[in-house]
Image: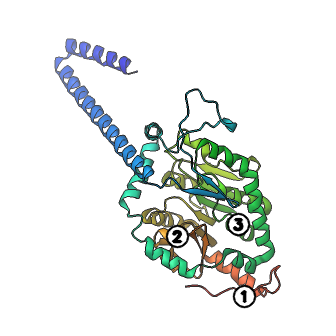
Amino acid sequence: MAVTCAVAVTCAVVVLRAVAPARAVAVLRAVAVLRAVAVLRAVAVTCAVAVTCAVAVTCAVAVPSGMASHLDGRTFRRHSRRVPAGSPARPGGLRTIPAMTISAVVRNAVRPGYLPVMARKVWSRVGSGHGREREAAHAWAAARAEDIGAWGCRVDGALWRESADAARSLAESARPRVEELVAAGVDLGGPGGVELLYFLTRILRPDTVLETGVAAGWSTSAVLAAVRANGTGHLHSSDFPFFRLPEPERYVGWVVPDALKGPWTLRVRGDRRNLEEILLPGTRVDLVHYDSDKTRRGRESFLLRVSPHLSGNHVVVMDDIQDNLVFQEYAETQDLYRVFPYGGKFIGVTGPGLAAVERAARDDDVTLGDPGAAPLPADPG
């Protein structure tokens, strides 16, 4: 293509020189300007790729190598082994790969649409001061945390037991897929709040659920299992693949059973672009699970974007609220919120739908399927 264009421009200039020398000079000047712009653009892209990759690698290697994912009481450690030349594929087509490779970052950075999202993620991580509010946020969450199982049993004991059973069933069915990841050295994180998401989806019976941050697909599986049990609803998921892995799209939603994927729409171009496609005019979201960009800027941008689309009886679930004070600031504008410890972190739940669920439990003497249950505690705020 480039050779063809060059030949065409050269022929045109030769003809112009013969019939209109002045115009030929103008064309040559324009070509020179365009060539300079192309060179500058290539340099800029190269520099952006280099900087993004360098910072991404720095952020990655700064993470402790002993991070673990938990599944039903078992701990799966991250492996980082290189693939010997000609080594056979693992079950399911996976090879043993390092948890992060510089070549994977570089390859993904030059793919269409990847570099801008990667750059934003890296800049957000570096520039937002991810840990500046962590101590205060952790103290706030810890002071208001309550046992998630006790709360669920007080709201609806029978449904909470169903939720716990569903979580165990999902974990067991996903075990072979998880073991493939472990053997291949891929760490996508473990389940978090699976019972809670199943429980809320069942009790709220939402028409539209929005989830950001899919990773392996634990929360996705929980919501979809509850949607199937309800017989109604649709899940929209927003994600951006782990760009530190080769072929990252293949791992998004890795543990989600095929049988549950019917009422599911997955987008993987990053929250900013995905939400433009999901939150169309007239869209109303009943249940939100936020588990993507954990920085203050990321959370605030999401809440600002989704707020006009929240239904009158919505619930917002936010993971890792101990990282900053955004959930506290948002929750304190609501009538009710709850904080639950989970896996050494904290999950926040708020919204008018939460208050409606708890009011219904109180109206039924807080014994829905669980005689003798203690009354629900008052709003922790």
- Is the C-beta separation of discs 1 and 2 under 8 Å? no
Q: Amino acid at mark 1?
A: Pro
Q: Which mark is residue 25?
A: none
Q: Nearer the viewer, residue 80 or 338?
A: 80
User: How many C-alpha atoms fall within 10 Å of the one at disc 1: few (<14), some, or many (≥20)?
Assistant: some
Alpha-carbon span between mark 2 and mark 3: 18 Å
Q: Secondary structure at mark 3?
A: helix
Judging depth in this view, the residue of 187 and 53 nearest the camera is 187
- The CA span between labels 1 and 3 is 21 Å
Q: Position of residue 160 (x, y in %)?
A: 76, 72
Q: Marks 1 and 3: CB-CB under 8 Å? A: no
Snapshot quadrant of residue 281: bottom right
Quarter of the N terminus within the rendering: top left
> Which residue is denoted by mark 3 in the rendering?
195
**Residue 204 placement (x, y as % from top left):** 71, 70
Q: Residue at x 79, y 67 (%)?
A: 162
Residue assigned mark 1: 375
Q: Is residue 301 visible?
A: yes
* Residue bearing mark 2: 321
* Amino acid beneath label 2: Ile
Residue at image x 68%, y 68%?
A: 196
